[in-house]
Image (cartoon, rainbow, N blue to C red):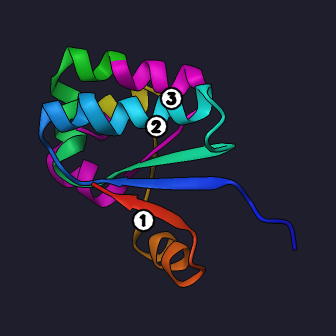
Amino acid sequence: MEKVNKLYILWTNGDPITSKKMVNMYAKNSLIHGWWEEVTLIVWGKPAQLIAENEEIKKLIKENIEAGVKMTACKACADQLGVSEKLEELGIELRYWGEPLTKVLKNDEKLITI
């Protein structure tokens, strides 16, 4: 079986500095520099609201998408925070992530949680 060079980043920290200086920076640079072939950034909780309200973070999200980062967010969180429409407008896929995250974990896939 071929090993997939894929990374998931589970982003739950709503701090703007962490967003800028770790989450978004690492996700984009991972693809640009070939550290990973595929990067999926999962937005869960407070970061959904941060993205919807912070213009600088929106810009970083757009740059990530342009670089090839797969952007997705927990639909339940986005709905509860009232930001689903704003996230979709940015090109972020909304889905219920409980079951898919469980599969990622059970399959021992590469996951960073921030």
Residue shown at the point (63%, 44%) measured from the top left: 36
**As drawn, 17 above or below 95:** above
Residue shown at the point (15%, 31%) measured from the top left: 17
State yes or no: discs 3 and 2 in contact (Cβ < 8 Å). Answer: yes
Residue 84 magenta-drawn? yes
- Counting residues from the start of the chain, the first of labels 1 and 3 encountered is 3
Q: Is residue 63 left or right of residue 108?
A: left
Nearer-the-camera pick, 75 or 66: 66
- Secondary structure category for the residue under label 2: helix
Asked which quadrant contains residue 70, the reply is: top right
Q: Which residues are magenta?
A: 60-85
Q: Quadrant of the C terminus?
A: bottom left
Which residue is labeled 3 in the image?
29
Amino acid type, mark 3 = Asn
Which residue is labeled 2 in the image?
27
Q: Residue 54: where, in percent of width, then height?
A: 17, 22
Q: Residue furthest right?
A: 1
Q: Residue 99: where, in percent of width, then height?
A: 47, 76
Asked which quadrant contains residue 68, the reply is: top right
Q: Quadrant of the N terminus?
A: bottom right
Which residue is labeled 1 in the image?
97
Q: Residue 112: where, in percent of width, then height?
A: 40, 59
Q: Residue furthest left?
A: 15
Label 1 vs label 3: CA separation?
Answer: 24 Å
Badge 1 crowding class, 10 Å Cα cut-off, few under 14, some 14 to 19, many 20 or more, is: some
Amino acid type, mark 2 = Ala
**As drawn, 93 above or below 113:** above
Q: Nearer the viewer, mark 1 or mark 3?
A: 3
Asked which quadrant contains residue 82, the reply is: top left
Label 1 vs label 2: CA separation?
Answer: 19 Å
